[in-house]
Amino acid sequence: MTAVTLPSRIVALDIVRGVAVMGILAMNIVAFALPEQAYFNPEALGPASPADLTSWFASFVLFDGKMRGLFSLLFGASMLLVIERAEAAGLASHAIHFRRMTWLLVFGLAHFYLVWEGDILALYAATGMAAWFYCEQPPAALLRTALFLFLAELLVMGVAALAYFDAHAAAVVPGASAETVETWRVMASSLAPLSAERLDEALALYRGSWSTITGYRLAEQGSMPFTAMLWFGCETLAYMLLGMAALKTGFLRGEWPLVAYRRAAWAGLGFGTAGFALLGWFMLRTHFEMPLLFALAVVAPIALRPPMVLAIAAAIILATRRGGWLAARIAAAGRAAFTNYLGASLVMTALFYGYGFGLYGKLGRAELWLVVLAAWAAMLLWTKPWLDRYLYGPFEWLWRTLARGALQPMRRAMRDATE
């Protein structure tokens, strides 16, 4: 038996990716366990306890959007790394890239329609295809394009916010038509508190069978993977380009001077934490009223997130630069991020939906942290022993095999293995 030689890993990249995939679950858990309105509005299901409001505030300031941004950043960096390594090996990098994205799109659509409607993989696949056209740009050009895309996303969402305010103003005018009132009700339905009837319907749906939930997803949410590309494509592509620039400059390789990482961490975290805390405080003061909630929870964070995402990455690199057992475990979780992401969906839907343990709607936000901590522990426990024996996580191996069109080696010692 001969050992398979893998390209050297960038440990800092793996560690940051590991934190990102674990952090994403900290926000997704609400979408797994509660109706969608509860994601941004902790009072969507009724008056929230102090513990639940505290949990919402902490999640909003520290996790909401930041982990998605971090994951998108790392996706761009990893995508560039695959392209560079393919070119170094004399392979057709564009063919490999587009096959990878095509199969990722297949995974994402299957994940969305058959498992969970919160999928992000289909968005990454489509955006990753667009990102390929920027991969040869120098860091400065990538940063300029990313800034333009962030501004474009802010503009798109800002226009949507104005539409919310206009629809609300028209609906509360004395004598407003039934059609005008209904238009506002539909617009506000994804964030506004649920009536008792709608809450009962949501609970009955997700405590039902797999076929019932999947049928609803196909009938009522079937266009979501495609509309997501329109709504969030600019921001997602911006983070991917930012990730490419961060890899090219050595930031995500851990090559910057420590003082530079410290400055980035303190500046970004200080600015971002203060900004998000102010937004959170104002939402609490206004009791999550619509349409202001949309502007504060969805639109304003677009401008605050990028420096905070970079600051979180810098802080992680600083905190784990000396390695250790925990850093090694987190890095392993990052190497198998695809499996951990999809595995979390399979486990959480089995835990909360009716075809599993049926806990949907039965746990508060604060209680959900116990589930998150247990899931984090599971990720840290299983991934490293697995990767000590195998080359890839299960879904990473499947994705690689499909994208390469040939069965890939799995065990760490296999004869005639090829990269």
Image: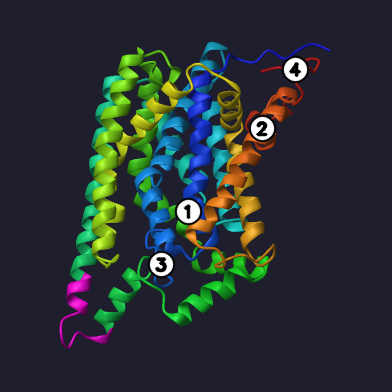
Badge 4 or badge 3: first in the primary sequence: 3
Tell me if residue 142 can be seen.
no
Identity of the residue drawn at 65% across and 51% down: 346
Find residue 103 and report its horizontal and vertical position in percent.
59, 39
Disc 4 marks a residue whose amino acid type is Ala
Task: Give the amino acid at mark 3.
Answer: Ala
Closer to the camera in the image, 108 or 385 = 385
Dot 3 or dot 2: first in sequence order is: 3
| Res. 225 mark | 1
Q: Secondary structure at mark 2?
A: helix
Q: Which residue is mark 3?
A: 48
Residue at x-position 19% and y-position 79%? 172
Is 41 located above or below residue 129 in the figure? Answer: below
Q: Horizontally, is 199 left or right of 340 in the view?
A: left
Marks 4 and 3 sit apart, C-alpha to C-alpha, by: 56 Å
For discs 2 and 4, the disc positioned in front in the rendered view: 2
Q: Which residue is mark 4?
A: 417
User: From the viewer's perspective, is 142 left or right of 106?
Assistant: left
| Identity, as a three-letter code, of the amino acid under mark 2 | Thr
Is 173 colored magenta in this rendering?
Answer: yes
- Measured in 3D between alpha carbons, the distance from the residue under mark 3 to the one under mark 1, in whole angstroms, is 31 Å
What secondary structure is marked by label 4? Answer: loop
Residue contact at pointers 3 and 2, CB within 8 angstroms: no
Quadrant showing the C terminus: top right
- In the displayed structure image, the side of residue 114 where residue 259 appears, left or right: left
Crowding at mark 1 (Cα within 10 Å: few <14, some 14-19, many 20+): many
